[in-house]
Amino acid sequence: MKQEFLQNGLVLDQDARQFGFSTDAMVLSDFAQLPAGSRVMDLCAGSGAVGFLLLSRAPDLRLTALELQRESWALACKNAARNHLEDRYEAVLGDVRQIRSLFAPASFDAVVCNPPYFPVKAGLPDRDEAFALSRTELACTLEDVCRAASWLLPAKGSFYLVHKPQRLGDLMVTLRSTRLEPKLLHLVQHRPGAAPSLVLIRAVKDGRPGLEVPAPLVLRGEDNAPTDAYRRIYGLSPD
């Protein structure tokens, strides 16, 4: 077991044997712009990093987290208690593929997700089953995630997703096929000129076509120093 100390006094327990907290959670929680008082669902929640970051930045949100693996779900419950967020955070042990039996349709204002990135046949070595479930689509495909988000959202509700640029074609096709219209696409680069390492997407349920693509989010400069964007996301003081 290891601990992560984050901004706003957050302390998260992480299982070192599983795929844990990373840049993905930080950039996704910063990217998701949620109206005051929103009811938010965090799909594939793991031990809760994305959800707790969102709650720490917006004291009026209420968040439900859905996680398949019992060990990660138990850690999310423990982290909620550690950070005194039990009144605004509910962790549910369940399968995203069974979303219709778990939650009513259109029961959330927004959905966020940091899903498994890689197809089952990607050929990536995995240390064990728990790690494999976190990074490959063994139990949760991109289509499963998008179908779940579409079920949970009302018309015009927002879905915020982080993924790999290599899957961008699959992302666009799958989002549209599940009535989620891509509206904002933000690429993430570690350094200027580097190939993007992540893609952030906001899609809107039954939204109109029209995609905004701003300049990439760059985390570090040529000198490897954190950019202003990195400092904001990680809650660091300005230079």
Image (cartoon, rainbow, N blue to C red):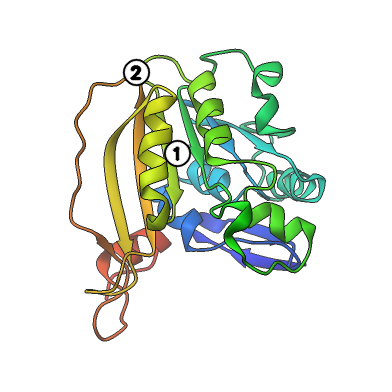
Query: Percent position (x, y) of residue 9?
Result: 56, 57
The residue located at (32%, 68%) in the rendering is 219
Residue matched to label 1: 58
Task: Work out whether 32 lies above or below 195.
Answer: above
* Helix, strand or loop status at disc 1: loop
Query: Percent position (x, y) of residue 179?
Result: 40, 21
Residue matched to label 2: 206
The residue located at (24%, 21%) in the rendering is 208
The amino acid at mark 1 is Ala
State the mark number for residue 69. none
Task: Work out whether 63 lies above or below 206.
Answer: below
Q: Is residue 168 left or right of residue 50?
A: left
Snapshot quadrant of residue 225 = bottom left
Instruction: Confirm whether residue 212 shows in the render.
Output: yes
Snapshot quadrant of residue 164 = bottom left
Which of the two discs, 1 and 2, labels the residue nearer the N terminus?
1
Callout 1 environment at 10 Å: few (<14), some (14 to 19), or many (20+)?
A: some
The residue located at (70%, 58%) in the rendering is 132
